[in-house]
Amino acid sequence: MALGDIIDGVIAPFAPRMAARRIAARMGLAAIRKYEAGGRDRRTSGWSRPSTGANAENAQGIVLLRNGARDLVRNNKYAAAAVRQITANMVGDGIAPMFTHPDQAIAQLAQDDWNRWAEGKVDGLGDFYEIEKIAARGMIEGGESLVLWKPDRSGPDGYCEVLEGDHLDIVRNQARSASGARIIQGVQFDDSNIRDGYWLFEDHPGEQYWSHNMTSRLVMAEYVDHVFERLRGGQVRGVSWLASVALTLRDIADIEDAVRLKKKVEACLALVLTPPDGENGSPLTGEQTAQDGGRQTLETVRPGMIFRTRPGEDVSTVNPTSTGDGVEFIRQQLAAVSANLTPYYLMTGDTTSATYTSLRAANLGHHALLDDWQQNTMIPRVVGPAVQRRLRRLALAKDRRVLECKVQYALPVRRVIDPMKDLMAEVIEIRSGLKLMSRALAERGINSEDHMKAIAQMNGTIDQLGLALEIDPRRLNDAGALQAATGYLAPKVSDSAA
C-alpha cells in the first residue's frame, strides 16, 4: 500500500471530504502522468512487451522469418510481386558511379576502368549491376546479403560473389573477452567494437549436398560487405522486410482459397430425385447401386448434377445462393500490406479505382522510401565499397591521383504517371535554381558530363548542316515560335560595320 493511501485512510474517519479531495487529486495526477499504452490494465493484459535488444530479437526469429519469407515469395503472388517491384525500382538497370576530378584525364581513367570491370563477368557469370540486384533482393527477402571479395589473376578485389545470410553462422557467439573482442551471431568485433571478421560456412547449409566440413571459418571484414537495413542502434544482422506482413499474406491466401471454393459451390445447381419403387439406377447418371446392394455415397457436388435417392427419400434442389465474397476485405488487407512494401497498384496490378492524384501520391511516398534505401543502404553498403576497392587497385597499377576522385551516382530512372505534368514541374525546379540539371540527369541514370558532350556534338551537327528543327530549343520555343534573339543567335557585328 502506498504512503498516500495510508494517510487517506487515517484522515477519512475525521475529515472524509478532505480525504475524498486528496484521493481525487491523486487519481487525476496519475491519469495525467500515465500513457495509456504504458499502463498495466485489462486492455494491455495480453500484450507482450519485452525490453529485448535488437540482437536478442533477431536471434529468436531471424531464421524462421527468413525461411517463411522465401516460402511466401515462392508461393504467394503478392509477396513475389512486391519483392520484384522493390528490387526493380531500387536497383533497376544498376546504380552506377560517375567520377569527377580537376584533371579530366584522371576522372576519365577512373570511369573507363570502372566501366570495363563492372560490365564484365565479375562473378564468372554476370556483371556488377546484377550483383547489386541479387544483393538487394536477398536483403529484401531474407533480411541480409554478403558480398564476398576475392582476388583474380590480375590482382586483389577482382572477383566478387553474393552470399545469402544463411552462410553467416548465427550460433557462433562469444562474450567479450579480456582483450575486448567478442562475437555476435557470427560477426566478430574488435576491442573498439568495430567489425573485423565474419564466420562463414563454405557452402550453403540448406543445399542438398553436404560439404566435408560444415564448420564456419573466419573471413576478415576487409573482404566482406554486409548488406542489410539497420533499424536499431547496435543491430548486427538484418531481418526480412516481409516480417511485419508475412502472417497477413498467409491469411489473405487462405481467404482467397475459401472464396474461390465458395464461388465453385455457388455455381452448382443440382437435383436430388427419388425414383419409383424397384428402380435403383439412373439413365442419366449411370448405375449407382453398389455390389452389396447398398447405396454409393456421393462425395462431391458439381454443376448440373442429378442424383437419385432411395425410394421414400425426399426430393430437394441444391441451389446455393450468392453472398458477399470478401473482395473488399481482401483489398483492404492488401492495401495495409502494400503500405509496408510497395504501392498497392504495383503489388496487385489493380488500378480500377486509381486516379492521377492517388497514383502520384503513392509514387511520391514510394520515391521517398527509394531514396532512403538507395542512399542509406545500397550505396554505402554495396556500390560505395566496390568503388573504393577498384580505385585503390587502380591507384596501385596506374596513378594514385584517382583516389582524389569525387563520386556521384547515376540512379535508375523513375517512371512518371503523367510525363507532361511531371516533367514541367521538374523544368520549373531547374529553371528556378531549386534543382541542378546534373542532379536531374543523375536521377535518370545519365552521366551529366557525357550527356552534355553528346548534346554539344548533336548541336554542332545541326548547325553544320543548316537544319532548323522544331525540337531545337535554341531556335524555337515549346509553342513552335522563334526564340527572341540571344547571345547565341544574335548576328555578329563586323569590325568594319562598327
Image: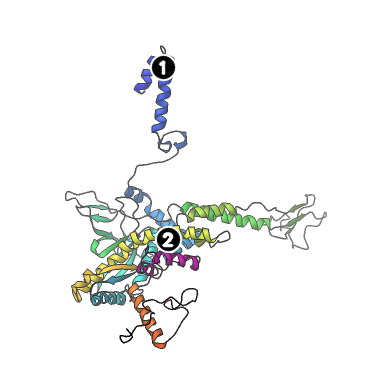
SS state under label 2: helix
Mark 1 and mark 2 residues within 8 Å of each other at the beta carbon? no
**Residue 236 disc label:** none
Residue 76 in view, yes or no: no
In the current view of this chain or complex, which residue is farthest to the top? 14
User: Vertically, is 470 above or below 99?
Assistant: below
SS state under label 1: helix
> Residue 418: percent from the left, percent from the top?
50, 66
Q: Which residue is mark 1?
A: 18
Q: Is residue 315 left or right of residue 172?
A: right
> Residue 1: percent from the left, percent from the top?
36, 23
Q: Quadrant of residue 167?
A: bottom left
Q: Which residue is mark 2?
A: 367
Query: Which amino acid is tagged 1?
Result: Met
> Residue 15: percent from the left, percent from the top?
41, 13
What span is colored magenta in the figure? 418-447
Measure how far apart labels 1 and 2 are at the Cα level. 61 Å
